[in-house]
């Protein structure tokens, strides 16, 4: 098959979560099919990734299309929020129509059999082009569910609650429009699937969980564990991640240090907020920002701590930590989408006191940490395989191509 991948920007560097999903799935499919990328770029940083992707060799061809500057009037309409989908297109007047013409020619020239589109903005930009090629929509994490859960937080101020309600309305209509446009969709967790099917009853949604690269994430020889080092990692400009880091530092770490004063806390990930950066001034807390190689940081840690207060989907950080044979302390939000064999390996606690106790119990029990880590890697190999995910996508693309 000849497949077209449509994405907002370039799926690079490989360290970002959404990029990982695309790169791992299509790297495996590229062994049997021709994969072409249509990158909808809207800033210089994204365009600068082109040489890296070309050198990687995954894509048979890469086509870049620059997204036009936002219309001021369209942006004002979006902020008012009367008709989110129409307002979105008004932000980029004529872009969806222009893109549809270009995609029709691209599909013909490359003899494309089926397409894959990922990212809410790309979904909407590509909606008119989808009439020219059967297209699979990868929702991955349901944004509607994300903002519904955000509203359930009791500590939101008036302005933040108003903004969240606005975003909930916007993404409810975005996702509803997308589900009505594309013939099939995929998500990473059963909760995301249920949320989408509530939006559009009868829509077709396939569940394909994220995998973990067992070769990339494996125990690193020659790096000693730092006793009492706790780690959280991920994109630190993603709200659930930096909220979890701030929450742990403010509400849980002081409780842990009452009995384990030697404990240190490391926050690893791109684009930490100013508030997160300020944590780095705290004794025993390190905020690294982006790192070239995440694995040594995981290897040095005693465990992953992930007190996720909201969010959706499967937490890649949990899978990756287990693959490196590290135990994980998290909460119900961090575990709800996991396979039962994974869930039973996680130490769960839903309030700061219980979370701190779970951390301290693990710190005091080295043998249990070792056992959880060893079993974690075994379960990752059994349950969360990128090979299995790519095979499921391959079957869906074959069905689309046949249609």
Image (tube, grey):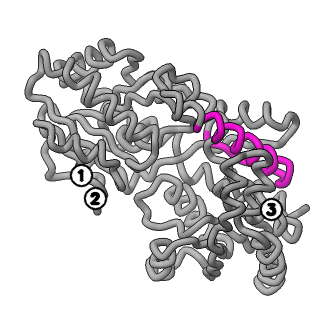
Could you tell me how far apart the alpha carbons at marks 3 and 2 are, in whole angstroms? 36 Å
Q: Which quarter of the rendered picture does the N terminus lie within?
A: bottom right
Q: Position of residue 257 (x, y in %)?
A: 14, 21
Q: Specify whether residue 304 is in view.
A: yes
Please provide percent x and percent y for residue 262: 8, 28
Query: Label 3's element?
Result: loop
- Residue 6 in view, yes or no: no
Residue 342 in the image, given as x and y percentages of width and height: 47, 29
Quick one: which residue is furthest to the right in this view? 403
Residue tagged 1: 288
- Counting from the top left corner in percent of width and height, residue 106 is at 77, 82
Q: Is residue 350 magenta?
A: no
Which image quadrant: the C terminus? bottom right
- The tag earlier along the polypeptide, 1 or 3, is 3
The residue that mark 2 highlights is: 291
Q: Is residue 276 above or below residue 308?
A: below
The secondary structure type at the circle numbered 1 is strand
Residue that carries the numbered disc 3 in the rendered image: 127
Segment tinted magenta in the rendering: 163-188
Question: Badge 3 local density, few (<14 within 10 Å), some, or many (20+)?
Answer: many
**Labels 3 and 2: the sequence-earlier one:** 3
What residue is shown at x 82% (from left), y 84% (from top)?
A: 105
**Dot 1 and dot 2 residues touching (CB under 8 Å):** yes
Q: Residue furthest left?
A: 262
Q: Residue at x 28, y 22 (%)?
A: 251
97 left or right, relative to 246: right
């Amino acid at each position: 098959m000849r497949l077209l991948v449509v994405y907002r920007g370039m799926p690079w560097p490989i360290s970002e979560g959404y990029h990982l999903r695309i790169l791992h799935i299509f790297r495996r499919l590229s062994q049997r099919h021709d994969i072409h990328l249509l990158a909808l770029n809207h800033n210089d940083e994204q365009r600068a990734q082109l040489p890296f992707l070309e050198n990687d060799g995954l894509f048979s061809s890469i086509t870049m299309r620059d997204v036009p500057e936002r219309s001021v009037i369209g942006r004002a309409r979006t902020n008012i929020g009367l008709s989110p989908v129409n307002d979105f297109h008004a932000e980029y007047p004529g872009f969806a129509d222009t893109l549809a013409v270009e995609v029709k020619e691209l599909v013909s020239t490359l003899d494309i059999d089926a397409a894959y589109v990922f990212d809410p903005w790309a979904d909407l930009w590509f909606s008119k082009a989808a009439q020219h090629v059967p297209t699979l929509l990868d929702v991955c994490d349901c944004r509607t569910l994300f903002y519904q859960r955000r509203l359930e937080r009791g500590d939101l101020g008036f302005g933040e609650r108003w903004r969240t309600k606005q975003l909930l309305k916007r993404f409810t209509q975005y996702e509803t429009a997308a589900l009505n446009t594309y013939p099939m969709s995929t998500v990473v967790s059963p909760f995301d699937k249920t949320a989408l099917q509530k939006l559009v009853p009868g829509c077709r949604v396939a569940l394909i969980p994220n995998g973990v690269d067992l070769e990339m994430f494996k125990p690193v020889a020659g790096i000693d564990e730092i006793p009492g080092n706790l780690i959280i990692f991920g994109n630190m400009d993603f709200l659930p991640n930096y909220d979890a880091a701030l929450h742990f530092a403010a509400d849980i770490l002081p409780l842990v240090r009452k009995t384990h004063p030697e404990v240190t806390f490391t926050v690893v990930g791109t684009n930490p907020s100013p508030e997160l950066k300020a944590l780095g001034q705290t004794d025993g807390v390190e905020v690294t920002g982006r790192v070239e190689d995440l694995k040594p940081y995981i290897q040095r840690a005693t465990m992953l701590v992930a007190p996720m207060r909201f969010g959706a989907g499967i937490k890649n950080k949990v899978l990756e930590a287990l693959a490196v044979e590290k135990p994980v302390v998290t909460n119900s939000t961090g575990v709800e989408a996991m396979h039962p064999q994974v869930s039973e390996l996680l130490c769960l606690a839903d309030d700061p006191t219980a979370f701190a106790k779970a951390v301290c119990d693990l710190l005091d029990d080295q043998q249990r940490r070792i056992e959880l880590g060893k079993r974690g890697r075994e379960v990752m190999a059994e349950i969360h395989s990128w090979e299995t995910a790519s095979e499921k996508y391959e079957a869906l693309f074959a069905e689309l191509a046949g249609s």
